Amino acid sequence: MKNKKVQVADWGILSYQEAWDRQETFFLNIIAEKRENRKRSVPIPTKNHFFFVEHPPVFTLGKSGKMEHLLLRENELNTKGIAFHKTNRGGDITFHGPGQLVGYPILDLDNFFTDIHKYLRFLEEVIILTLGDFGIQGARSDGETGVWLDIDTPVARKICAMGVRASRWVTMHGFALNVNTDLSYFDHIVPCGIPGKGVTSLSKELKKEVDPERVKARLIHHFSERFEAEITR
């Protein structure tokens, strides 16, 4: 039996390592439950989670990323108070920090659909629909996961990065949407390993601060509709 209930929680401000450790706990618990279900005559429905979090300044490098896309040396990172982590998600290098809305859906895709590419496209669509609520037209870029603005122009810029991990159809990691983010941090990396393209935020595009709680509400609304999920808190 498929369980389409998704428990949503907000972790507030949390270091990247602590959030990663928490994710791993939920992720591994769901995988363990799936293994146990194979031994049961009546399987127990697995759980799904969606966590919001904001990180102190940190650069993270995906498993397919290149170190040369980090443009600072270790002593410079320390001076600027920026952490650095190599991670087990997909994608290259990105930045997390204050004013950025990070979402970590930890889902058993057996409850929805078993297609990781479809999962990423659905996440992108959730972001695009949310941006639309603020009068911003987001778009996909062929071959590049995430959400962009003005993609086919010389001023193409990324507003949302994505990178996930999946095992036994259980997901972790997720997306990072720039809401009120200090974009100067991106000067120290080649964002997502893609040279020549910029980054932006909701506040930069709208020329004003944006209420992150309103963004979260719209994200969850579109997530629940796109994934046909029942949201609990």
Image: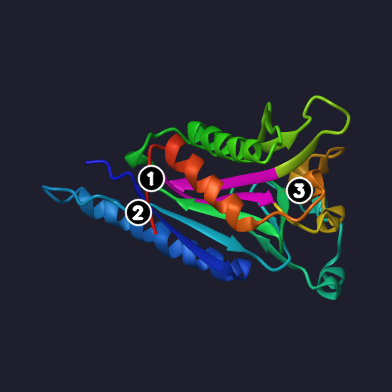
Q: Nearer the viewer, residue 179 or 21?
A: 179
Mark 3 to mark 2: distance in Å? 35 Å
Above or below: residue 121 compared with residue 86 = above
Q: Residues within 10 Å of mark 2 (few under 14, many from 20)?
A: some
The residue wearing badge 2 is 31
Q: In the rendered structure, does residue 183 fall within the stretch colored magenta?
A: no
Q: Give the mark nearer the N terminus: 1 vs 2.
A: 2
Q: Give the mark nearer the N terminus: 3 vs 2.
A: 2
Query: Tag 2, which secondary structure?
Result: helix
Dot in front, 3 or 2: 3
The residue lying at 43 percent from left, 42 percent from top is 224
Q: In the rendered structure, does residue 161 fall within the stretch colored magenta?
A: yes
Q: Which mark, by number, is residue 168?
A: 1
Residue type indicated by callout 3: Ser
The residue wearing badge 3 is 201
The residue lying at 69 percent from left, 33 percent from top is 138
- Whether pointer 1 and pointer 2 mark residues with C-beta atoms closer than 8 Å, the reply is yes
Q: Position of residue 176 (x, y in %)?
A: 64, 51
- Whether pointer 3 and pointer 2 mark residues with C-beta atoms closer than 8 Å, the reply is no
